[in-house]
Amino acid sequence: MDLTDSQVQKKWRPLRLWIVIGIGLVLTSAVVIMLVVFLRSADDYNRDMEAGLPAIKVVVTNGCGIDRLASEYAQSIDKLNIEVVALGDTQRPVFDKSIIVVRNGDMQDLKRLQDMTGIKRHTIALDRNYQAEFEIIIGRDFDDYITKP
C-alpha cells in the first residue's frame, strides 16, 4: 500500500467530483434565470404594467385627408389599453407628422400613451370640457404607427 494514497482520499475523490458538478449546475441555472428575467422584452413588461391601469380615453382624428384613416388607426390600437371615444377629421388635412394633443390628461398618462402608440410628438391644448383626455391626430406618417395584423 502506498503511503500517499489512503482509503480516505479514494472515497473523497468521487464526492468532490459530484460537488463540483452540482455547483456548476447551480451556477449555470442561476445565469440562465437571470438572463431570462433581464432580457425579457420591454413590450411584455409594458403590457403587464398596463393591465392594472385604467384605459386612456382618446379621440382619433384624421389629419391628412386619407379616407377612413382614423377608423383604420383605431382598429390597429384596439388591443392596447386605449379607449377610443370618437373619430373625426381635422378642419384642414395638413398634418405631415402624427401628434398627441393633451386635452385634459396628465403627463404620466401622456408618457403611457406615447409608449403604447410610439407617437412621441405632443402638444398641450387644455380643454376641460373635451370628451377625452387626449387627441391623437394621425398625419401622413401613419404607416409608422398603424400595426398590421
Image (cartoon, rainbow, N blue to C red):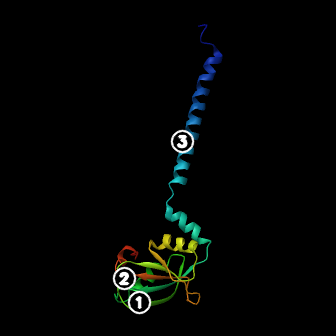
For the residues carrying marks 1 and 3, which lies nearer the camera in this image?
Answer: 1
Question: Is 68 or 32 nearer to us in this picture?
Answer: 68
**Residue 20 visible in this rendered orientation of the protein:** yes
Question: Is 137 or 57 nearer to us in this picture?
Answer: 137
The secondary structure type at the circle numbered 2 is loop
Res 95 label: 2
For the residues carrying marks 3 and 2, which lies nearer the camera in this image?
Answer: 2
Res 90 label: 1
The Cα–Cα distance between marks 1 and 2, rounded to whole angstroms, is 9 Å
10 Å crowding of disc 1: few (<14), some (14-19), many (20+):
some
Q: Residue at x 63, y 13 (%)?
A: 6
Residue 55 % position (x, y) = 58, 78
10 Å crowding of disc 2: few (<14), some (14-19), many (20+):
some
10 Å crowding of disc 3: few (<14), some (14-19), many (20+):
few
Q: Residue at x 44, y 74 (%)?
A: 121
The Cα–Cα distance between marks 1 and 3, rounded to whole angstroms, is 58 Å
**Residue 1 visible in this rendered orientation of the protein:** no
The reply to whether dot 1 and dot 2 touch (C-beta < 8 Å) is yes
**Mark 3 is on which residue type?**
Thr
| Quadrant of the image containing the N terminus | top right
Question: Is 1 or 94 nearer to us in this picture?
Answer: 94
Position of 42 with respect to 93 (left or right) is: right
Residue 28 % position (x, y) = 54, 41
| Quadrant of the image containing the C terminus | bottom left
The secondary structure type at the circle numbered 1 is loop
The reply to whether dot 3 and dot 2 touch (C-beta < 8 Å) is no
Q: List the residue tagged with mark 3.
A: 28
**Mark 1 is on which residue type?**
Thr
Classify 85 as above or below 97: below
Classify 111 as above or below 21: below
